[in-house]
Amino acid sequence: MLNNDTQLEALWLQRLQQNDEQALAAIMRKYYTALYNYGTRFTNDEALVKDCIQEVFISLWQRRESAAEILSPRYYLLRAVKNKVLKSLHQHTIRINAMESESAYDFYHEFSVEKLIIDKQMSEEQATTLRKTMTKLSKRQHELIYLKFYQHLDHAQIAGLMNLNRQSVYNLLHETIQKLRSLWQAELYN
Amino acid sequence: MKDFRLYDISDFVIDEDFIRWVHEQREEDNLFWNTWLQQHPDKHLVVATARRVVESIQFPQSNINEAQVEQEVSRLMNTITTQQMRQEPEKGKVAGFKWWYAAAALLLCVTGTWYFYTRDTSVPPYAYASMVAAKQLIEHTNTSQNPLILRLPDGSQVTLAAKSRISYAHTFGSADTARNGASRDVYLLGEAFFEVTKNPHRPFRVFANEIVTKVLGTSFNVRSFEKDTTIQVTVRTGKVSVYAQANTQASAKMSEIILTPNQQLVFERTRQKFQKVLLNNPIMIVSPAIERTMIYDDAPIDKVFGDLSKVYGINIVFDSDLLKKCTVTADLSNEPFYQKLSLICSAIDAHYELIDGQVVIESTGCK
């Protein structure tokens, strides 16, 4: 299945290179929800996110000749959308290096524990503990977890997107997982 | 292959395959993990904990629906079409080229119209209209902007591109034994991707203008719009044979041509010329797990080329006697096809050429 997806993507990129607008449309359809979801982590301005996504696809079309060089469309698009959104957010304010410091940009993200409670996989009490654990995580950790578990990127791609080296991605991820894991381990070993 | 026995809770939690199992609950994953747990009963607790951790990481659903996405897609399509019309030529040379291009387009329109008015008498016998006429056919036309997925009576799947038409006979998928040996024929105007169910007794044939593509079971793409100057057949998996329809000018010049994965046949309709080429970005025809084994330490060259050929289904021609002493030490487990090929060639000081849809290696041998 995964293999089929990659094959289909390769086919789309190739057709894009051959000036096929439908291939561009197909790529947009496939990734729109993921890109929109990611874009709205940085701002509440939904119209701005939509405009940014449009611009990203227009420039993909303008550079279609080199489309075959894109190895992972998901990674390429997420990265482009993030850069575009952050750039337009900071356009009228102070010019800062958005990537450098922890507080340079916000990452709004709330873990939804409601579904777990409804599915009876978790008690109210456990949910409260989980929420508390989550609020202790930094914005970077939230973004990391989001990219890993929602967007299914690999470590190298996460590193590229967050301007970290691979080792820091791994360390940060491990630290986060440790926190979550102690929560469940206590319950299961008792 | 990963050794999950060595995995700790945290290793499971961040493992892609493990996450996929927890998130998607696919049947093949269920099977794998249940069997694995039976073999390693001491791992139950570790896996259960890891599962809870992955399950506890849930994300709020995006509040955008399909209709909104479609709206954004048409907005994009509008922008790129108007942009193309507005694009001004920048330099003299380019401008000259573009004018020529415009003239050619105009000429095509004119011939198109002419065909329309004189259709009754002058449609070539291989054109869609005449192939379809007088046969009792079921026709599907895709008037939408999106690819249309169709399932044929025999179980084959067709992804019909926008503005394309396809037809086939009522008797197409009939299990009638009297029809055994009869081919499964479809007529195409436009572009479609075919995933054909295997049936060695009933060849599957696609008629597209001058060209016929015949297969036994495979997936491939045919692009043949009436106004296009070329017809393109691209093979993804399996093998197809392509030949010209009888009584066309092309049939005299072209006998049956076999296409294998990652090869494309381009037929130039005006010059009646055809060419077999490799795709710019060949895709693997085997599972990516096999690609990951392509790490070599002093490996003989025929093993390396053999693997490369197997992974992409592309024929590589080389003189194994001459290259007998050549060995390769390289990690080729994560590179695109042409990158792999260049790395191997630079390791053994050789060159490659693409001839007739295959790779030909030129070298003077190794010491």
Image: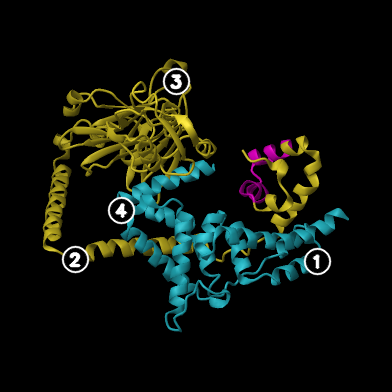
**x then y, percent, for residue A122:** 79, 60
Q: Residue furthest bottom?
A: A93
Q: Colour of chain B?
A: yellow
Question: Which numbered mark, 4 or 2, is in the foreground of this view?
Answer: 4
> Which amino acid type corresponds to the residue marked 2 in the rendered image?
Glu
Question: Which numbered mark, 4 or 3, is in the foreground of this view?
Answer: 4
Q: Is residue B30 magenta?
A: yes
> Which amino acid type corresponds to the residue marked 3 in the rendered image?
Pro
Q: Which residue is mark 2?
A: B88
Q: Which mark is residue A124?
A: 1
Q: Colour of chain A?
A: cyan
Front one among B249 and B253: B253
Quarter placement of the N terminus of chain B: top right
Q: Which residue is mark 3?
A: B200
Q: Which residue is mark 4?
A: A65
Badge 4: residue crowd in 10 Å (few <14, some 14–19, many ≥20): some
| Same subunit: marks 2 and 1 | no
Alpha carbons under labels 3 and 1: distance apart:
60 Å
Alpha carbons under labels 3 and 2: distance apart:
54 Å
